[in-house]
Image (spheres, rainbow, N blue to C red):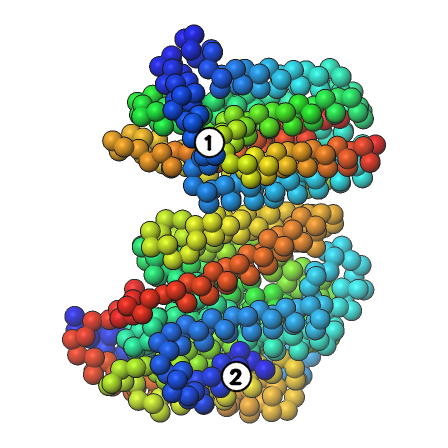
Amino acid sequence: MNTRGQRILLWTAPPAVALFVLAYFAFPVFSPPLSPTLTPDQVAAFFRGNVTGILGVSILCNLIACSLVPLFAVTAVQMSRSATSSPVFTYAYIICVGVGTTAFILADYCWGMAAFRPDRDPQLTSLLNDMAWFFFVAPVGTIMVQNLCFALSVYLDQRPDPIFPRWVAHFNVATVAFLAPGAFSILYKSGPLAWNGPLSFTLRLTTFAVYITVMFWALLRAVNHQGDERVALA
Amino acid sequence: MSGGVATVPRSGSEPAKSWRTNRKLDQWIAFWSVPFFFNLFGLVFVPLSWMMPPRSPSSPTPRIVDFMHSHNLLIACVILTLAYGLAPVSNACYLMQVKRMSVSPAFRYSMMVGAMTGAIVGMLFPMFCFGLGAFRPGYSTAVLTMLYDFGYLAFIGSLGCFCVMWMAFGLAIILDENNILPKWLGYYTIWQYVTELMAAPVWIVKSGPFAWNGLMTFWFAMILYVSWQFIVYFCIFKAIKNQPESEFA
Amino acid sequence: MTDVAEGSAAGVDESVVDARGHVPGESSMWFFVIGDLLIFAVYFVGYMYFRSQHQDLFLQSQARLNVDIGAVNTVMLLTSSLFVASGTAAARAGNSANALRAWAIAFAFGAAFPLLKLFEWIPEISAGLTPGKNLFFMYYFVMTGMHLCHVALGLVIMCFVIRNLKTSAQPKISLVETGATYWHMVDVLWLVLFALLYLMR
Amino acid sequence: MTSLIRSPLTIVWAFLTTVTIASSFISVDGGGAHQINTTVTTVVLLIAAVKAYLVIQHFMEVRRAPLWLKLTTSGWVLGLFTLLLGFYFAGV
């Protein structure tokens, strides 16, 4: 068994990231991010004025929402190679990926729904917008646990020739710390922790982007070192 | 503060070399995160936000509005969004034992998908319904009561994703020939499935024993569920403990 | 028919009587049976408690049930249980052919139960007697519905027992006994349900 | 055929079926008015208790089971029907 398949899946990540970057810069809601202090009428007016942009990005994101899953799947495969007593962290990792991705899809749905019929009652448009932000910014719990599971499986790897270098695990733990503030966006409507604040929005997205890039290179290296070794996950 | 933070010190601080010698360290870390998670879950739901025991579906609108505006709901929401990632870890503990059984991998794959969908519809979504009401006090009462209903129904209403999980888990235990978990636990797990059936009437009535805060649909199912949870963790504890070293690859 | 009964009678009375203190089937199934009996007991007692709070409502609602189908269904389950019991005894006595026949007949009677239930439920639901109608009908549909799930599971288990009897030269007696134990429990629960929902005043 | 009729299981079954039909007649005749009727209820519930006990003893073969199983199942029948009748009469 060679690693060609894993490498192919891995290389689907860069185009996916490119599409996400495109979606990010094309999304009217993000430039600049809508303030949580807007009244329902202001939110409704915003959605009425930007139907095309929001719908376009929502459709695009519906299509590409799961396109980073192959990257995570390869991560899971590499995790399962580490010499621990069980694949318990791999399983937790896979479930976390599913949950986190669904949360992103729900966020996208809510924004798309608000733009689909922009003359809806402003209360409802505002509710959909709030819900979208909640699902987009707040549910950091799964990606935190996901990264911790990855880090733990690297730390506990008892191979003489570890699959991932130690610093990848340290890096994953650090991302956990940087992602955590996102959850507090539920509590604040202004300041650094609000959903448009530097800690919840900018730091979180930057961390995520750096994380994907670093993981991509780390995985590439791990897969290339795998050689003919069979993977035990099932 | 979060589940993440709680598990980090154990690994991040590179525990003593004696820990290193324990080959099952990964399983023990995952296992001990579970009681932590459930205690947190209980604390957040009961004394912090008083979301549980469930409020009446027929309580008067002003009381619903009052409740939906309580600030503690937001704090509860924050804690849970930080910690809900630990639910997959607890499910991974079951999955690990199912992997050791003689049954087909299809069982643990079914459970895995059940766990994924369950975490979204049974935890994250209802949580956000409650959080949204408190987040923006300007919502009309119609929106608030809808969020209230949506939150409770998604949380308590019967969920097929858990049905599939318990079915796969119960069947795997019963069919297993390696005796990883006791057979009676498999039969006990069938009642877990039944508790989901029991919860079906909450969609129909708004008061009495079959409402979402009812004696039959909530309290009775809760008694079955909580005792099952304790027993299953005790059994998993023994299963991890009894796993022979020779099984490790 | 005669053979079945002969086999069973012989099996029960001679070969097993000496086995004092024999727990039929897997003991884990008994764990389930006793637990299930207790779970249903909570429902039964809950029904009685709420009935005493709303006597008239329950009595008037009971008037709209179909006692005939209920009684026929009781007889169906009892007869099915009889054949299960004699089939089990035949299997124990080593008479696979008779056991198989008895279990097949038992399955036919058991399968009639959900069909009759359908004939009972559909007119009721189309007449507006849904679980949302009142507390009695909620109890009625929840309890008979949960019982019906047990019947469905029982029919599946019966299929496994029948396959076991049909395909293997030495059928697994413990499987046969386990299936029988479960099926009789379904019967017991229905007997109580029938009295509580249809008959009492 | 004679052995079918004489088989203890069949005798139990015949008894169970007869009392089932009898109890529905009692209910329909005595309680047809759908008013509280303590006699009908008592008779019907006692019949149900006896039926459940017989099925457990004879069909489930608890008759030949160890003592703990006999006690548990009999205790269930006794306890359940005591509670049922108790709640019934408390509410009448």
Q: Is residue A192 above or below residue C26?
A: below
Name the secondary structure under disc 1. Answer: loop
User: x, y (%) of residue B39?
Assistant: 60, 71
Specify the quadrant that holds the C terminus of chain B. Answer: bottom left
Q: Toward which corner of the image does residue B104 lie, by quadrant?
A: bottom left
Q: Where does label 1 land, which residue?
A: C20
Q: Is residue A60 left or right of residue B63?
A: left
Q: Where does label 2 land, which residue?
A: B5
Q: Amino acid at mark 1?
A: Arg
Residues tagged by mark 2 and mark 1 found on one chain of the structure: no
Mark 2–mark 1 distance (CA, rounded to whole Å):
59 Å
The answer to whether one can see residue A175 in this image is yes
Q: Nearer the viewer, residue C75 or B174?
A: B174
> What residue sits 60% from the left and 47% below the top?
B198
Q: Nearer the viewer, residue A77 or B220?
A: B220
> What residue sits 68% from the left and 15% below the top?
D25
User: x, y (%) of residue C2?
Assistant: 38, 12
Q: Is residue A42 above or below residue B228?
A: below
**Number of other residues with Cα within 10 Å of mark 1, as a class: few under 14, some 14 to 19, many 20 or more:** few
The answer to whether one can see residue A16 in this image is no
**Number of other residues with Cα within 10 Å of mark 2, as a class: few under 14, some 14 to 19, many 20 or more:** some
Q: Amino acid at mark 2?
A: Val
